[in-house]
Amino acid sequence: MSAASPTARRGIATRAVLYAILGLFAIVYLMPLYVMLTTSFKTLEEIHQGNMLALPGQWTLDPWREAWGSACIGLECNGVHGYFFNSIKIVVPAVLISGLLGAFNGYVLTKWKFRGHKIVFGLMLFSCFIPFQIILLPMARVLGILHLANSTAGLVLVHIVYGIGFTTLFFRNFYASFPDELVRAAQLDGAGFFTIFFRILLPASVPIIVVTIIWQFTNVWNDFLFGVSFASGDSAPITVALNNLVNSSTGVKAYNVNMAAAMVAAVPTLIVYILAGKYFLRGLMSGSVKG
Amino acid sequence: MSFLHINNVHKRFGETHVLKGIDIAIEQGDFLVLVGPSGCGKSTLLNMIAGLDSISEGELRLDGRCINDVHPSRRDIAMVFQSYALYPSMTVAGNIGFGLEMRKVPRKQRREAVDRVAKLLQIENLLDRKPGQLSGGQRQRVAMGRALVRDPQLFLFDEPLSNLDAKLRVDMRTEIKQLHQRLGTTIVYVTHDQIEAMTLASRIAVMRGGELQQLGTPQAVYDDPNNLFVAGFMGSPSMNLVKARIVEQGGLPVAQVATDDSTLTLPVVRDRDALRDWCDRDVILGLRPEAITDPASANHGEGNIHEAELPVALVEPTGADLYVVTTLGGTHVNARMRPGTPLRSGERTRFAFDVSRMVVFDPESEQRIRDERTAETTPLEETA
């Protein structure tokens, strides 16, 4: 077999075309990120000279500082940092509580089946398909009745309710392939309902926990509609603040500050993906083969 | 009062009647094996003893105490599961000690108990590993350790060897038997493998379709089966079941069997009184392969040997034995002969029938035809 045989040559050619296409798509997808990053390190004068794709002639961190601490959003000029922490205050409890409730639901729906468990699961699954817009008015009414309108707690509640459908789906499918014999063995060993959950099932659920955290974190962090509808002013999340920042015009559009603020808004989800990404696919697959 | 008493136990799942009144009683130290084909209800019965399935009707007594409504963890029962059911996130030591931990045994005592069991099962060097790092045989040992450490009144085994490869299965079988002999524990063991049942049990309960077919010692179940099902299920190669006719000859019942070219007459030794009523009626004869041999290896001392020359249909050497197939009553019949007997299919040779081991069945009801007084191993007698 010589290296120059026709089949081998055709193989190399195919591969080259394949990589060319992949490279092209990678460039297309990475281009916006590149533009955002470079623009956020440029001075306004440099931006006004045009040439969007060029690297910054003079690197500066001022746009980042301004976006974080002093950019004007509406009438206040304190930057996005307050809203960044708002988002954290919303995301952390929303992810943890909806995740825990989903894990619990999955546990009960697979290991302590009751009459009608399929209908209950079906309804929870159905909630995954309800578009956001439909629930805006009813939810506003509910939050009003609970005196949670325009508050971080209210937004947390909305995200928990909306997230339970997904987290239940993840954990139910994962626990469906978790052997029932383990639960029975633990029962014989004298473990109760909660002990079995916390000692046996939960420690074995790392892949699906990671999936749930990534999914819920990105969804809640990136949410704009609920944020803009149910939390305004000081309790708004960063997505809403970013929108307001861009729309607060003071004459000249500070593209570099806008880009830096957008990067600030995007960084947490990027970090979560980079840290836990390899578990994501693995976890998504693990529940889907069976159950 | 017996140690474990299963008294007329029923199980229904909605409309389906899974267990139809099971009566079994065993003594302390007994090794009871529940054996039967899949779907016979043996695992359901085991789960009911464990408390993992509810009892629809009847009563379960352990050491004199009714345990129908006692929670699984308070029955003083430990179970080894088919899949071993080791907790994946805990170490071997954690797995073995979990039951004690749940019972609030102090850490130091727990550690001692785990070490003692680990030593018994020779898994001391595995205590810090996770179940995922163990081989099949090691997991099996850990699963047994988890049951042993609690020192319960009763051990339940649910097909514990079915996930092991053939060689390991035989080794572990021996180990379980040795463990039982050393510790003198009471065991209920479920399997569909009749060889496991024969080798391990002190009592075998053969089940089919939710009903107990026979309860007795392995030898009794093997030699003296209650019906055609038990006769065919126990033993490998299985018992030869041959169509025959009972006729009277010289005042005694004899069995006549059609061979390829003539008729073979075999005298009846067992259950003669009962068979007097069966003259001129069709029956089914049961003869174990080892009860049909070459004349030289026949047990002339104790048996009642009847010889006949028959054509050889097939010869199957297994190394240890030579199975010679002939045709009786229209079906193939296995005879176990000395290996090295020079035989080829188509030849004729002399077969020696040990008629003292022959059993007779009613072809209609498939029940054994037996004298009243020999009915020693029927379930009713056992539980009385």
Image: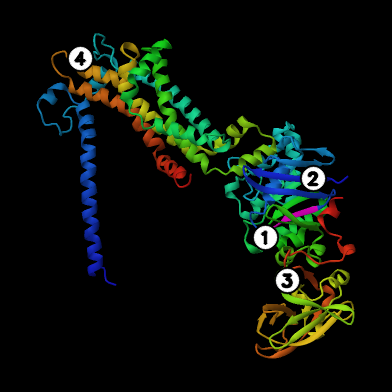
Residue B254 lies in the magenta stretch: no
Q: Nearer the viewer, residue A32 or A192?
A: A192
Q: Residue sitting at 39 percent across and 38 percent down?
A: A277
Provide the chain ID for the residue under circle 2.
B
Mark 1 or mark 2, whichever is nearer to me: 2
Where does label 2 land, which residue? B7
Q: Identify the magenta region.
A: B31-36
Q: Are marks 1 and 2 in contact (CB under 8 Å)?
A: no
- Residue furthest left as drawn: A49
Q: Are marks 3 and 1 in contact (CB under 8 Å)?
A: no
Where does label 4 land, which residue? A248
Q: Earlier in the sequence, mark 3 or mark 1?
A: 1
Judge whether B267 appears above or below A53 on screen: below
Q: Seen in the image, is A178 located left or right of residue B271? A: left
Mark 3 or mark 1, whichever is nearer to me: 3
Mark 3 or mark 4, whichever is nearer to me: 3
Mark 1, secondary structure of its residue: helix
Three-letter amino acid code at the position of disc 2: Asn
Q: Are marks 3 and 4 in contact (CB under 8 Å)?
A: no
Label 2 crowd (10 A; few <14 / some 14-19 / many >=20) = some
Asked if badges 1 and 2 are on one and the same chain, I answer yes
Q: From the image, give the main secondary structure of the stretch colored magenta.
A: strand
Query: Looking at the picture, how far across and down is residue A91, in whole percent?
Result: 40, 23
